Amino acid sequence: MKLKNILTSALMAFLFLFAVQANAQKFSDLNKSPMDVASFPTSYKDANKLIKIQYSRPQLKERELSELAPNGKVWRTGANEAAQLTLYVDMKLGDTMVKAGTYTFYTIPGDKEWVAIINTDLNVWGSYYYQDSNDVARISVPVRSDRKSLEAFSIAFKESDNGVDMHLGWSTVRAVVPFTK
C-alpha cells in the first residue's frame, strides 16, 4: 500500500511540475528602443501637467541620423509606434490653436529646419500610414548643431516666456518646437 501511495505522490508531483512549466509566462527581452515619456512640468509627482509625449528612443549605434530619420520624409519622431502627444490644456502650435487631447506627433527632418506635425491618428505604428489630411497643426522650426552628440533620440520640455518649448535632440541635431498658451 505504501508503494502505491509513493507512486501516486510521485506521479502527482510530476504532473504538477509539468503543468506549472506548461503554463509559465514567457516575457520578451528588453526593447532595443525603449519607450520613454517627457512632460511639463517635469516633476513626475506633479499631477498638473500641461503637456506630455510618449515616444521610443532609438540609438545611433554607429549609424547615420540621415539613415534613421531621412530628410524630407515624415518620421514617427522616435522608433516603433508614432510618438503620442497629450495636451492637457488648449495650446497653440504656430498660429493654430489645438484643443486639449491626445494626438500623434510627427516630424519631417531637414538640414535647416524640421516640420513638427500634430495629427489626429492614434494607435499608429511608425509613419507608414500617415495621412496629411488628418493634420491638426504644423510648424517649421530651425535646427542647429551642438558639439555634444546624443546617442539616443531625446525629448525634453522647458518653460518659455509664453508657454512650453519641446526640445528634440539626436546626434548633434537640435530643434525646439514652441507650444504657447
Image (cartoon, helix red, strand yellow):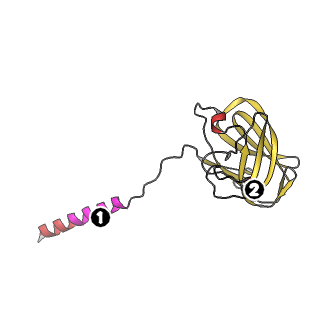
Which structural element holds mark 1? helix
Give the vertical position of 80 relative to 18 (above or below). above
Residue 158, located in which quarter of the rendered image? top right
Q: Which residue is mark 1?
A: 16
Q: Nearer the viewer, mark 2 or mark 1?
A: 2
Q: In this picture, which residue range is highlighted in magenta?
A: 10-24
The quarter in which the C terminus is drawn is bottom right
Residue 104, located in which quarter of the rendered image? bottom right
Q: Is residue 157 visible?
A: yes
Q: Which residue is mark 2?
A: 133
Q: Residue at x 70, y 45 (%)?
A: 74
Percent of width and height locating residue 174: 75, 36
Q: Nearer the viewer, residue 88 or 9?
A: 88
Q: Residue at x 81, y 43 (%)?
A: 140
113 on left or right of 53? right
Mark sitting on residue 126: none
Percent of width and height locating residue 91: 83, 56
Q: Nearer the viewer, residue 159 or 132?
A: 132
Residue 14 located within the stretch drawn in magenta = yes
